[in-house]
Amino acid sequence: ARLLRTTGKEGSVIVEQLKKEKQGVGYNAATDEWEDMAKSGIIDPTKVTRSALQNAASVAALMLTTEAVVADKPDPNANNNAAAGANPAAGMGGMM
């Protein structure tokens, strides 16, 4: 979601288009194009993807059962475009 925000795209629109695309095609936020992820070298290990989905579901369930959430207020002066070119696997030693 954060990566899409840096591109100015609406996440729900991208997700709906992704549902219509054939297997292996995804949205490349860096180039603003739909492309074959494997041919482009954008490959997520299954373990990483599964862990991300499990963690997201866990946090969502926790937020639904909590009456208050403490979060950082976004800094309007921050450079939010820094993540667009970042290596998504950085810091995941041994995963790639």
Image: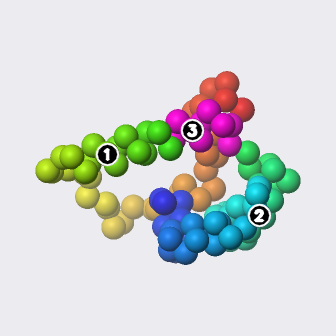
Residue type beneath disc 3? Arg
Coordinates of residue 43 in the picture (x, y in percent): 73, 45
The verdict on residue 59 being magenta is: no
The disc, 3 or 2, on the residue closer to the chain's N-terminal end is 2
Q: Is residue 61 above or below residue 74?
A: above
Furthest toward the left, the residue is 67
The disc, 2 or 1, on the residue closer to the chain's N-terminal end is 2
Q: Which mark is residue 39?
A: none
Q: Which residue is mark 1?
A: 61
How would you classify the magenta stretch by its main secondary structure? Answer: helix
Residues at marks 2 and 1, CA–CA distance in whole angstroms: 30 Å
Residue type beneath disc 2? Lys
At horizontal 43% and vertical 39% (from top left) the residue drawn is: 55
Residue in the foreground of this view, choosing between 95 and 17: 17
Q: Which residue is mark 3?
A: 50
Kindly tell me whether residue 89 is visible in this rendering.
yes
Q: Secondary structure under badge 3?
A: helix
Task: Residue 21: name its quadrant.
Answer: bottom right
For this view, does 88 lie left or right of residue 57? right
Q: Residues within 10 Å of mark 3 (few under 14, many from 20)?
A: few
Q: What stretch of residues is rendered in magenta?
A: 44-52
For this view, does 28 lie left or right of residue 15? right
Q: Which residue is mark 2?
A: 22
